[in-house]
Image: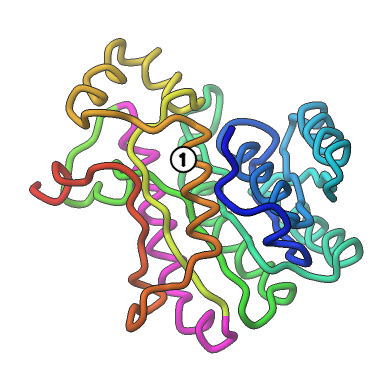
Amino acid sequence: MTTPLAAGSLIGKRVLVTGSSRGIGADTVSYFAAAGASVVINFRNKEARAKKLADSIRAAGGTAITVGADLTDSASVTAMFETIRAEFGGLDILVMNASGGMESGMAADYAMVLNRDAQVNLLTTALPVLGEGSRVVFVTSHQAHFVQTTATMPEYEPVARSKRAGEDALRAMAPQLEKAGIGFVVVSGDMIEGTITATLLERSNPGALGLRKEAAGRLYNVSEFAAEIVQAAVEPVPEGTLPENHTRYVGDITEFRQA
């Protein structure tokens, strides 16, 4: 895959990407490592994949550690940041990528617990290791970002509403972040081909992915969307843009804005 940043451009930077043992998170953390950043690969239950990814990064000359943590378990999150402080001394970039809610066998409120409550706790717990000039990136979807004005697929609505609730709760922390000199940006993308979410949606609503692709003209794949996340983490925030209002849209949003 084509690296979005120049080799060595992030030497000295320390990055955590949640949910980075596979999919978008794995490609995102790989891009950061290729640019010279020291990276933390976070996983919940895919330890083998996380270790394999870390080994490949180290084999290429990069620096990577793996830290398991269930984001819905506050003690687990606290332990993760203690490990990061011990290993790296702090963080310069936090990418809040991990989300869910379509898994089978979970409690009825699992989506809200993971996509809102756990995200707020994650950022709150991260604040002591995020220094001035650091950047936080929250990853979401157009279907969630615009869910208050644009209907989404019934199968995805609980996830979309919980993701939007999480985004709103994080944006409410903007004054606190701004005071600490921490940047905040939301990256919103359309359905992404090759993701677990897209697979689950297609399974529950056959043809949904094709219909969305036809309506949008094209859909980004995993590596393309990961590259956009990386760019959002390092690019300057537009002058005059308040932290709580800065959003990077990936893919066409005409349909969502018109609703």
Q: Is residue 233 magenta?
A: no
Per the image, the residue denoted by label 1 is 225
Q: Secondary structure at mark 1?
A: helix
Location of the N terminus by quadrant is: top right
Task: Check the image and tell me how it is coloured.
Answer: rainbow
* Image quadrant in which you'd find residue 157: top left
Residue 209 spot, x, y in % from top left:
31, 20
**Magenta stretch: helix, strand or loop mostly:** helix
Q: Which residue is situated farthest in the bottom direction here?
A: 179
Q: Residue at x 69, y 74 (%)?
A: 130
- Mark 1: amino acid: Phe
- Name the side, left or right, on which 166 lies relative to 128: left
Mark 1 neighbour class, 10 Å CA radius: few under 14, some 14 to 19, many 20 or more: many
Q: Is residue 158 magenta?
A: yes
Q: Residue at x 33, y 52 (%)?
A: 249
Look at the image and give the residue range highlighted in magenta: 155-181
Q: Which residue is situated farthest in the left direction here?
A: 258
